[in-house]
Image (cartoon, rainbow, N blue to C red):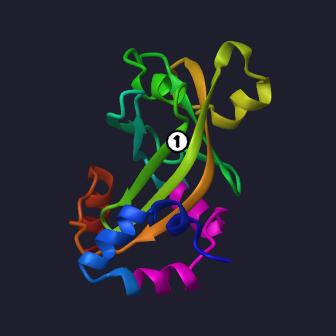
């Protein structure tokens, strides 16, 4: 089976650009041998559970892209199943740009970074939003963070369409305070 990420993202205009800049042949091989990368494995689940931040892109009805940073305690983005992610959207989100955007076009793209180890996971999916007031107890339990006191207003689900691991070549290592302290203690 072909690589699902390549099937979705390598549109005709992308293929034309790849041909123009000499990378089409490489990308054809990549699409043929990698994948299918449409179901998260234990490797992706472990990576996601360690993240305390990610970036999410949506598009509004006028075609404008919007990229939002989401952050919380490590593991706040949960793998619910091989093709489903979820997180709690807490009280305080007032602009609701992503929530509004996906009411018209449910496609989203996530980038999850591991700066110290120079790794990046890209996820394509379809986002749906469930108001906490009508959510079943099991839905709330799946995303609640016991040590985080903010009130859940919405549950965001992302049905995974495809994912891809990215080349570390141009990722500059960055460290959180905790990661930096670990490095200092290791030396």
Left/right of residue 133 with respect to residue 175 in the rendered view: right
Left/right of residue 22 with respect to residue 82 in the rendered view: left
Look at the image and give the residue range highlighted in magenta.
Answer: 26-48
Numbered marks: total: 1
Q: Residues within 10 Å of mark 1 (few under 14, many from 20)?
A: many
Residue at image coords 53%, 56%: 48
Residue at image coords 57%, 17%: 153
What residue is pinned by disc 1? 107
Provide residue 7's location: percent of width, then percent of height.
55, 66
Image: 33 above or below 93: below
Most prominent secondary structure in the magenta stretch? helix
Image: 86 above or below 155: below
Residue at image coords 42%, 55%: 112
Provide residue 34's location: percent of width, then percent of height.
56, 80
Provide residue 22's location: percent of width, then percent of height.
27, 83
In magenta segment, residue 27: yes
């Amino acid at each position: 089976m072909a690589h699902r990420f390549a099937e979705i993202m390598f549109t005709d205009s992308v293929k034309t650009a790849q041909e123009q800049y000499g990378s089409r042949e490489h990308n054809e091989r990549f699409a043929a041998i990698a994948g299918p990368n449409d179901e998260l494995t234990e490797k992706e689940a472990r990576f996601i559970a360690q993240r305390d931040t990610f970036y999410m892109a949506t598009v509004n009805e006028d075609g404008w892209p919007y990229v939002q940073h989401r952050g919380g305690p490590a593991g706040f983005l949960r793998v619910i199943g091989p093709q489903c992610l979820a997180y709690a959207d807490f009280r305080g989100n007032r602009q609701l740009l992503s929530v509004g955007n996906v009411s018209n076009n449910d496609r989203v793209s996530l980038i999850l970074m591991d700066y110290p180890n120079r790794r990046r996971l890209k996820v394509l999916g379809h986002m749906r939003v469930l108001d906490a007031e009508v959510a079943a107890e099991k839905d709330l339990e799946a995303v609640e963070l016991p040590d985080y006191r903010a009130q859940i207003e919405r549950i965001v689900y992302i049905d995974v369409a495809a994912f891809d691991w990215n080349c570390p070549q141009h990722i500059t290592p960055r460290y959180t305070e905790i990661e930096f302290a670990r490095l200092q203690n290791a030396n």
